[in-house]
Image: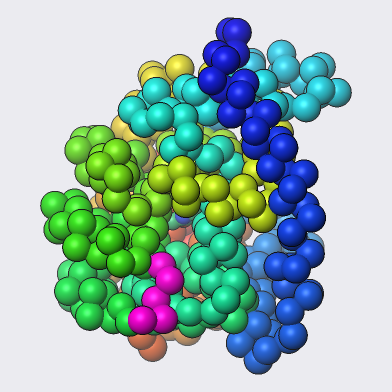
Amino acid sequence: MTLPNTSRRQWLRRAALTGAGLAVLPALRLGARPASPALLSGFAEYLPQLEWERRLAGRPELQARMLANENPYGPSPKAIEAIAASASTGNRYQHEAAAELLTMIAEYEGVPEDHIMVSPGSSDVLEKMAIVHFKDGGNVVAADPAYMSLIKVTMGMGGDWNKVKLTDDWAHDLPAMKAAINEETKLVYVCNPNNPTGTLTDNIELRQFCRDVAGTVPVFVDEAYLEYLPDYKSKTMVPLIKEGKNVIVARTFSKVHGMAGLRVGYAVALPETLEKVYQISRGNMGLCKTSVEGAMASMRDTEFQKMSVKLNDDFREQTYAGLEAMGLSYIPSVTSFILFPIAMPGEAFLEGMFDKGVGVRSFDVHGKDYCRVSIGKPEEVDLFLSALKQVLV
Ligand SMILES: Cc1ncc(COP(=O)(O)O)c(C=O)c1O
């Protein structure tokens, strides 16, 4: 495909900004800041996120890998083909291919190209947005529990997490979040559907919340799992950005597209918000040519996406049925994972499950232990249920 002139111009402009950004970056690098207690504790807290990676080290390979909400069916065969075919062009930078992907995403989202930033996974978007919004401190208003990536970087930058408990049915408590915004609030973070609970906040209420709030403070909506919903296009917050609202939506190729290890994601946001990121960072330089080619092929492979969603639905039901048969309760999920309470300490539970070759995660939610299990293939679901019977005594 030939690169449209607008994309090429946009790309060159960004490449130029990259050079400028590098000159600014040292001043913002964490090492250049005095080490405040908040900064140190932020990063100290980040380490336990690697807890399961450490747990894997030195053990036999897991028989059931249900700990990172990966899609067990991906990548799409068409993506694999595109990746293989592009490997030999890896001596060249990814600029043109990345600009092509950006054009495809902009068309898919129905927004102008300058409303899209493509990134190596949506973690990159979460982290860079935290850096640009919290370089001078402030607080993020976000749920507790929530997906921690943006919150951890916020705290690492010296900012605070203004926690708001979820409602009794595990939705975001939007009135309480609105009330929690103060003059120090630099960003509101809404993970919808939420991780680790797997629950959805009503899209009409969330849209109204964004309309009320985004004039004062930007709202970051993390839609990593939204594509698992059959009618997700009616639930995304992207239309608000088209209306000019200061909302940032992050999406990823790691879930429905099954490309977690290939690292592609993107942000949809107002150009002036993205510009803040381009001013301090290397823009899309973290992208990998093969992954970009794979992402484009995967976008075209709508059959694979439908299959991913359907199989996830089927085996989520199978997992529910197994939990019910054991008399266990769970939080009904709209995502590729389920959170359920466990009547034993999370650490001992994890050890027991890992010993049986089953990788899951444990979470302490307001003083209670929970297991989060990703939806696996049917044989993994069976292994998980059988290990659960033995470990939960
Ligand atoms: C809610 C949520 N957002 C973002 C991410 C980051 O995904 P990635 O960096 O692979 O796009 C994850 C990963 O599990 C997630 O659960």
Look at 70% across and 67% down and name the residue there: 28
Q: Is residue 63 left or right of residue 103?
A: right
Look at 65% across and 33% down and name the residue there: 13
Task: Farthest residue to the top: give it.
Answer: 1
Question: Is residue 73 among what the camera can see?
Answer: no
- 89 in the magenta segment: no
| Nearer-the-camera pick, 78 or 188 | 188
Look at 53% across and 59% down and name the residue there: 129
Quarter occupied by the C terminus = bottom left
Q: Main secondary structure of the magenta part?
A: strand
Q: Is residue 240 left or right of residue 97?
A: left
Boundaries of the magenta span = 183-187
Task: Farthest residue to the bottom: give it.
Answer: 37
Q: Position of residue 126 (x, y in %)?
A: 52, 57
Quarter occupied by the N terminus = top right
Q: Is residue 386 left or right of residue 193?
A: right
